[in-house]
Image: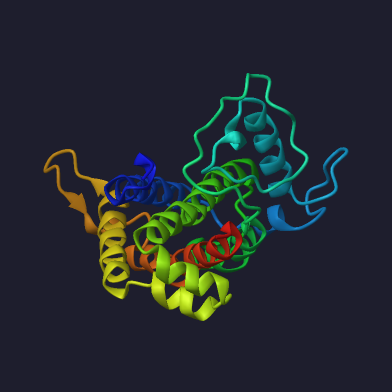
Amino acid sequence: MHPNLKLENIRNVLIRQEETIIFALVERAQFKRNKIIYEKDGIKLPNFDGSFLDYILRGTEALHSTIRRYTSPDEHPFFKNLPEPVLPVDAYDFPIKKTDVNINDRIKEIYINNIIPEMCVEGDDGQYGSSAVYDVNALQALSKRIHYGKFVAESKFLSDKETYLSLIKAKDEAGIMEKITDKAVEEKLLKRVALKAATYGKEIDIVTSEPENENQKICPNLVADIYEKWLIPLTKKVEVEYLLARGY
């Protein structure tokens, strides 16, 4: 088995990603919703037909594409037709099968329509640039975490090939979903991210070095809800789609 597919390595990656996501959400939550940045032509932009967020996201991905970000198997762009890398492309030893599974459109839709309204105070504070930059950070972190389900799925597949091959050949989506689901692990995950959010989202009193409970930057239960309602189901969706697409 490829080292990147060993359970301990996967667990360590996912835990690091939790922290990246929580910090990204904390940063975005400091600004109001600023709904105009998600509306097509809400802010007039030269030579661009789309929302202000898409403008920033597309520009960020275009730059990152030139330095090989999207040649890595754990990175998935939101936009197509990005520039070619200016650096030589490394010959990666892909630990997973190459597939076209990419649910970033769905991730962005949920982020804008569900996560942002729950996380941010309603209204407009004029902080459009900062809000969009933190949106990009959050979207990229969420996308990476959700699409890492491919690595999780491949590891599970290799641990029980016979069962998974039978389910894949039968195109049994419900059976695959049941097979990959571990409720006990999910419950531990939800408790862990809520605890991290409670810790990272507090101001620290420099005199006592104790967190100030009244100065929460983001509600810990909200972060756990985001995982429960969106991240976990979307990750499992990627796992199922990947397993069906990977072949035998």
The correct choice, above or below, for 138 with respect to 161 in the image is: above
Residue sitting nearer the eye, 106 or 85:
85
Give how far across and how far down residue 12 sits, in percent.
Answer: 30, 46
Residue 189 located left or right of residue 46: left
Residue occupying the far right of the picture: 47
Within the image, what quadrant is residue 160 found in?
bottom left
Q: Quadrant of the C terminus?
A: bottom right
The correct choice, above or below, for 171 with respect to 80 in the image is: below
Residue sitting nearer the eye, 73 or 52:
73
Q: Quadrant of the N terminus?
A: top left
Q: Residue at x 67, y 48 (%)?
A: 78
Q: Residue at x 72, y 48 (%)?
A: 54
Q: Residue at x 72, y 46 (%)?
A: 79
Give how far across and how far down residue 143 sits, in percent.
Answer: 54, 52
Residue 206 located left or right of residue 243: left
The correct choice, above or below, for 116 with respect to 96 in the image is: below
Within the image, what quadrant is residue 3 found in?
top left
The correct choice, above or below, for 119 with respect to 12 in the image is: below
Give how far across and how far down residue 105 sits, in percent.
Answer: 67, 59
Give how far across and how far down residue 61 sits, in percent.
Answer: 66, 37
Residue sitting nearer the eye, 197 or 159:
159
Q: Residue at x 55, y 42 (%)?
A: 75
Residue 20 located left or right of residue 242: left
